[in-house]
Image (cartoon, rainbow, N blue to C red):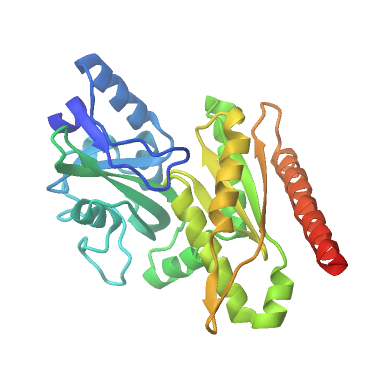
Amino acid sequence: MVLFLKSYEFLPINSQLGPKAPARSTSLSFDESDFCRDILESLPTGVCVLDTQKRIVLWSDGAERITGHLRHEVLGRCCIADPLLHCDQPGCEFCNEECPLAHAMKTSHNAEGTGILYHKAGHEIPVRARAVPVRSEHGSIVGAVEIFEELQQSPQSDRASCSSQVAEFLDAVTGTANHAAMERHLRRALSSFREMQAPFGIFLVQVEKLGHFRANLGAEAGFSFLRLVARTLESAFSFTDFIGRWRDDQFLVVVNEFHEEALSSIRERIRRILAREGIEWWGERHSLPVSIGGAFVRPDDTFEMLLDRAQQSLSTASAWITGADAAGSNSSGSL
């Protein structure tokens, strides 16, 4: 798709970190566009680009590894006529409008979901997929790019079994990745960092006083607030980042491609966003304080070392909130 290679524009993503910048096109020379294509094709994550006819025009090394389909076997093929991408309904043979790629092109908005990828060997692979519409320099939709990652390898071809395996990696309350999925993703991110030096950081987001909140308002109120935090985090971070529930009152966020100097500003930005959130429960608005700890990956990091630094940062933030609440209570009591 020449238009994609010569000039492209990713739609502004509401979840991008930092100040929002106006959408703009970036014109590339022939050599530069080949260079960008080479980068996309070499990514270990599954990356697929479709034109408006849903023909595959780019297929990354990661897509080859995940699906078993080589690049020359899929380029130019239509994902409707020859189903290669995800399918989220039992017995579904063709792509429908609920597909993230179709949704992105139809609505001009980012989309994500979980579903099934067909491996060349015949079995099905549960994946999490994120799609972003692509615009031409004139502003029209010319296709979409999808990034997909395995939730779990599946040697079986039974659809119900695959759906069950997808569910095993999702948190039942928030619908985000669960602890097992987040641990697996973080270990992979560390492995990629050692191989390719791709920087990333992590944030632990803790909902304070959740137990007291549940005791007063009930378990469902607690679940509702956790779902609110999950949705807020998903909208506040980029579609390339990974968010999941780490513990009962904690979320883990793995953030790609940023510099260590930005750690504090990102953490403060997320804290302010979450501070404005609350739920309506029995006619009253309720909110809870949130503590955030962060850590940036280092060359000698192990899985445990990285998490330990983030936990230490979180403990400091949580202690500050506890101290502030205590000081406020004492001031109120002295009036």
Residue 160 x/y as whole percent: 41, 72
- Residue drawn at the location 57% of the way across and 69% of the way down: 225
Q: Is residue 152 shown left or right of residue 89?
A: right
Q: Nearer the viewer, residue 39 or 249?
A: 249
Number of numbered discs: 0
- Residue drawn at the location 25% of the way across and 57% of the way down: 103
Among the 4 quarters of the image, the one containing residue 261: top right
Q: Nearer the viewer, residue 154 or 286?
A: 286
Among the 4 quarters of the image, the one containing residue 12: top left
Q: Is residue 240 shown left or right of residue 105?
A: right
- Residue drawn at the location 67% of the way across and 29% of the way down: 298
In the rendered image of this protein, does residue 198 appear above or below residue 114?
Answer: above
Residue 286 x/y as whole percent: 59, 72
Q: Is residue 32 shown left or right of residue 17?
A: left
In the rendered image of this protein, does residue 7 appear above or below residue 164?
Answer: above
| Quadrant for the N terminus in the image | top left
Residue 59 x/y as whole percent: 29, 37
Q: Which residue sits furthest front?
A: 335
- Residue drawn at the location 53% of the way across and 41% of the way down: 255
| Quadrant for the C terminus in the image | bottom right
Residue 273 x/y as whole percent: 53, 53
Residue 151 visible? The answer is no
Residue 38 visible? The answer is yes
Among the 4 quarters of the image, the one containing residue 94: bottom left
